[in-house]
Amino acid sequence: MLSHALHYGTGVFEGIRAYARSDNVYIFRLKEHMERLKDSAKIYFMDLKNSVDDLCSATVELIAKNEMRCQTYIRPIVFKGFGGIDLNLTKAPTHVAICPFKFESYFENQKSGLDTCVSSWRRISDVSTPPMAKACGHYLNCAAAKVEANLNGYDEAILLDSNGFVSEGTGENIFIVKDGKLVTPPLSASILNGITRDTVITLASEMCVQVAERNIARAELYTCDEAFFTGTAVEIMPILTVDRRQIGDGKMGVLTGRVKTFYNKVIAGNVEKYNSWLTPVYVRSVKQARTEPAITAETSLKHGVDPVLEKFEMSFWHETHL
């Protein structure tokens, strides 16, 4: 109840996906996510002593011990606990938790594309709060834009930066397509340096598609040929309309489709060059029965604790000992 993070938003987190295949479960770009988590903690003076390798090992162990063999979303979070009501977060202890859960689609009804609006709210600015940190408190800005969009009948919002240029969605980076080229806002447009954004830029180069990182004027959203969001949760999601203006022919664009297809091949492990981005969970094939018993709700309840929390804490603390 008196956690510093609960009162002041002093936490940083990540969103990571694990994909189930017939031979194993693979976590996508785990190391890069944990590196960003460490960077976010550093920006906010959070004393995260765990190494990137520690965090990666704990995540793999956690999923394996809980026998998760499904499409999974992983939420690591570093947050400040009880340390009084002083705003100086360095006085509060640092806690780390990792929570994986079954996850398929971020948007309801498995939508094939999104109707969006430009939010009346502006994206947080680096002159007041560092957007490069994936911090808990920052997402109040995103929540305000998301609720506004949903109440007005849209699926998602697009935020502009403090200078009026396109920044990002409430939980996604954005790309537009014009004349066969990909364009995405630069880091200076108050965006989060997205892992999926970086993936798309890398894959576009492989596809010999030109990518420009530059400021995007609001009107370019209305006149572009295609547009799509990128993010761990949404993966690659086409944008069909912006402020009730149809993008292209109102369907997923050709280049968007090519990028999405290539991305899906990579996360499925069908592009050998990028298999280093995939971290296997199980040492042995998932088709083989594990000899180590899973942690169950029944055994947890005997100790009078929340079974879900115990599963996460047991496998995490066993490895890292914060």
Image: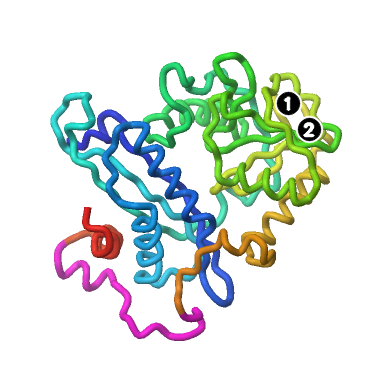
Location of mark 1 (residue): 221
Residue in the picture at 33% in, 31% down:
44
The chief SS type of the magenta part is: loop
Residue 90 percent location from the top left of the image: 21, 32
* Image: 6 above or below 100: above
Location of mark 2 (residue): 247
Helix or strand or loop: what does disc 1 sit on?
A: helix
The numbered dot on residue 77 is none
Residue in the picture at 22% in, 57% down:
321
Taking 56 as reference, is 236 left or right? right
Residue 186 percent location from the top left of the image: 62, 28
For the record, the magenta segment spans 284-304
Q: How many labels does the image show?
A: 2
Residue in the picture at 35% in, 38% down:
41
Nearer the observer, 30 or 116: 30
Asked if marks 1 and 2 touch (Cβ < 8 Å), the reply is yes
Nearer the observer, 197 or 222: 197
Nearer the observer, 155 or 217: 217
Say which quadrant the N terminus sits in.
Answer: top left
Residue 169 percent location from the top left of the image: 58, 32
The three-letter code of the residue at mark 2 reads: Ile
Could you say which quadrant of the image residue 94 lies in? Answer: top left
Using a 10 Å C-alpha cutoff, classify the residue at mark 2 as few (fewer than 14 neighbours), some (14 to 19) or many (20 or more): many
Q: Is residue 108 at all visible to an observer of this figure? A: yes
Q: Distance between the residues labelled 1 and 2?
A: 8 Å
